[in-house]
Amino acid sequence: MTNLTRRDFLKLSGGLAATAAALAACKPLGATTDSPLPTVAPTAAPPTTIPAPTAVPINEQTIARALRRLMFAPKAEDYARAKQIGLEKFVDEMLIQPQGDDPDVASKIKDLTTLGMSPSELVEFDQDGKRGKPGDELMRATALRSTYSRYQLYEMMVDFWTNHFNIYIRKNLTGMLKTADDRDVVRKYALGKFYDILSASAHSPAMMIYLDNFESTKNKPNENYARELLELHTLGVDGGYTQQDVQELARVLTGWGVAGRRGAKPGEFEYRQNIHDTGTKTILGKKYENNGQQEGELVLQALAKHRSTINYVSKKLVRRFVADDPPQALIAKAAKTFTDSDGDIPKVMKTLVMSDEFRASLGQKFKRPYEFIISALRVTNAQVDPGRALNNYLNQMGQPLFQWGTPDGYPDEAAAWATTGGMLTRWNFALALCNNTLREAKVDLTPLTKDAATIDAAIDSLSMAFLGEKLPNEGKQILTKFGGSSNVKTATPMLAALILGSPYFQYR
Amino acid sequence: MNTKLSRRDFLSTFASGITYMGVRTPDWYPRFTFFAPQNVGPRGDVLVCIFQRGAMDGINVVIPYTESDYYKARPTLAIPEPKSGKDNAIIDLDGKFGLHPSLRPFKEIWDAKQLAPIHAAGSPDPTHSHFDAMDYMERGTPGEKQIPTGWLARHLQTVAWENKSPFRAVGMGTLLQTSLRGPVSATSLQSIAEFHLGGRNRSDPIKQFQSAISQMYSGSTPLDQSASLTLQATDMLEKINVGTYKPANSAAYPKGNFGTALMQVAQLIKAEVGLEIAAVDLGGWDTHVRQGALEGDMPDLLAELSQGLAALYKDLGEAMKKVTIVTMSEFGRRVAENGGGGTDHGHGNVMFVMGGGVNGGKVYGDWPGISKDKLDGPGDLAITTDFRDVLGEIVQKRMLNDKLSEVFPNYSKFKMRDVLQKLA
């Protein structure tokens, strides 16, 4: 009888402990309320997901939880080092832009030859049977980097900017050119200055094609990129611009595009003066006289330091690293650092991470599917050979790499992801991974519980490895009952799958 | 197959284990049920809510071909007038408007008076942002960002009956549509055939795993509710043999996610698992470049849309009497085409309503015209019908919910156009 409803379960279960466990259910670690996900009321203001910041101390537990928030998943050595040198120094180390790949990752991706290719070389794959190669290699490299790189916060930031400057790789040449965008825009400046990544994105051939700017001409300007540059990359939709500003910016950006097939360097960014609108334009009240490509460069500089941009980007960072409903006070603090440091992203991140609001929010941010999958692969020390099968799991949960069609990037709130189909796939993935039935990831879980003499000890060991802390009692009792009298080695895969499928592991 | 089978007939038939009127019951009918039928009188239609993401170019869908401005504004995108009589010409509807030729499958439904376009409809908020506009439309609250729930979720919350089925509201696809987000949990479903835990036939360890999981998610948070719904849905689908589904009346769904989603909606409707609302998306309408007049991205999408909905219509047969289908898109597109053979973001658009309760065969709406002086903002079709007028009429007349002020808060000026008959 597996179709027990909750009420049936309560009626049937004889053991007091089990009943208590069921009644208590399992709150995510760190939750101070019963409702870590936004509670939805018919006509209420958006709910606050985290309590008002109280002085949550920095201790071993908060350090472990901070690491789970900032990395796809910390490993034993990360917990150890952070506890040794303290959270602040550990964060400082993680906020340094790495020079090249982690050596372990470099050896795994060395055969992916398209990763280093120039746009001209990449567009040569635009032939039958070859188009998919750069995109496939990029997806593979991205999953390997997320899983194996020691630069875990950097990889999280790469994921953030990948979404902020989202490019869909199923739109003609973007499938090839995204490789250059990933390398020369996102990875190059992920822990740099905001202006640099914004400007690099505006000169990215993949972006020019994705948002149609390469076809925008003085006679028939195309508004697509101009609009999203204002709405999504800089000011935000409530940032104070008008439809007129969009149209004027589209005129400024006429001529920004990509060199065609007959050019010397097809596929590279190219400015074409002959299709540029040479008239005077006015954007956000400022006049731009005829000045060729330089007009666009000046607008980008103005946008990067505009008050609305600073607030908008700060808010997105707070949403990504603190809470679905970003606390206003923390946005203000982040925005101040943004202003004072001229858009220095590591400094803004440091402000976030060292805030009271950050510590008060730990353990309550619902993992997106990609974070769930990568964190499960990391904590189980899986040997990963990422390809279509893994991406198919992501696809079933709605987050395949580089395949969000619209320029706003994947949603960053629990309500979008905590769905029935999504939960089912998480459980099925946990089962398949721990029972070693995945084609593209193999695990050996025996070392994790080899020193455990009892089921209880095994649960503790797995929990320490997966979460950096032991399960709370109500969760542990359910697993203890599940383990019953079986021996540790036999029970390990299913216990591991249960922890990965539990509410605790769905949050960071 | 007899699709007139009411839910009560269905339950009594299976309780006694006999075939109904000599028709052998299909394998995918549920063998028993996990939610008690509620004794609340007749329920409303099943609503199939289609969202065309990216902003469909309504001007090239239901085409005002008698306006010379149409041909002036669209040197490469205009469709030939109906009088040419060719296959690539507009399909005339009423001497003033006509369908894009890729919508040919709609013609039969129009002729049967079960299809009604409402033109120059949309959301009154002037935003040209896809994301704001989609949110406003799916929440049913233009210009208002403080209401986080969807209009369909509020309908489910306020309608007079309860329904404990995990398939009461289903969002087809991987992410749950904003329209369905709210206090009444909805199921997101990609594939009925693959919706099971740990393989189709559950082993004992999987059953124990499921039991432990259900205990861990037995609280009352939205995640707990979503998890419980998931487990109930897998239990119920285990009882449906989905491998053998064959659409009725030789209905042919188009290949791809949209056609597959609609076929699964038909499956859920026929299996009588308690479905009241299905939300289905069709994306790709943001045609800034190379939109295509008769061939290309947009004609392909129109073919997919009309073939899909016509297949659903055909497959459901008599059951369409209690099904309403509505289409919408966040806004329309600029009347004049741009330099890339496409169109930029606009305002007014066309909606379709289809079903047994539709007063079809007529183009609804006050047509504002597309001459320069009639356009809105940067050159857009003006809006003369608020999308909430169309949805509100469906909610009231076909979904039997009078609480329009809760489904569409802050809106009271409903202008019902009698697009639909009141469900008796």
Image: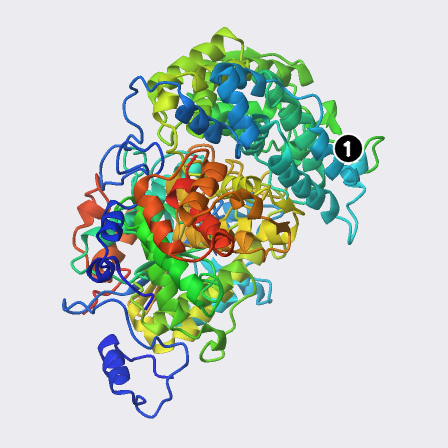
Q: Which residue is mark 1?
A: A116
The structure residue drawn at horizontal position 60% and vertical position 55%, both measured from the top left corner, is A438
Is residue B335 shown above or below A103? below
In x, y percent, where is residue A159?
56, 32
Would residue B416 be visible to someone looking at this image? no
In x, y percent, where is residue A355?
39, 16
Q: Residue furthest front?
A: A453
Q: Nearer the viewer, residue A276 or A40?
A: A40
Mark 1: amino acid = Gly
Callout 1: SS: helix
- Indicate the chain on which mark 1 is placed: A
Q: Nearer the viewer, residue A398 or A391?
A: A391
Would residue A420 be visible to someone looking at this image? yes
Quadrant location, the C terminus of chain A: top left
Quadrant in the rendering for residue A38: top left
In x, y percent, where is residue A327?
34, 23
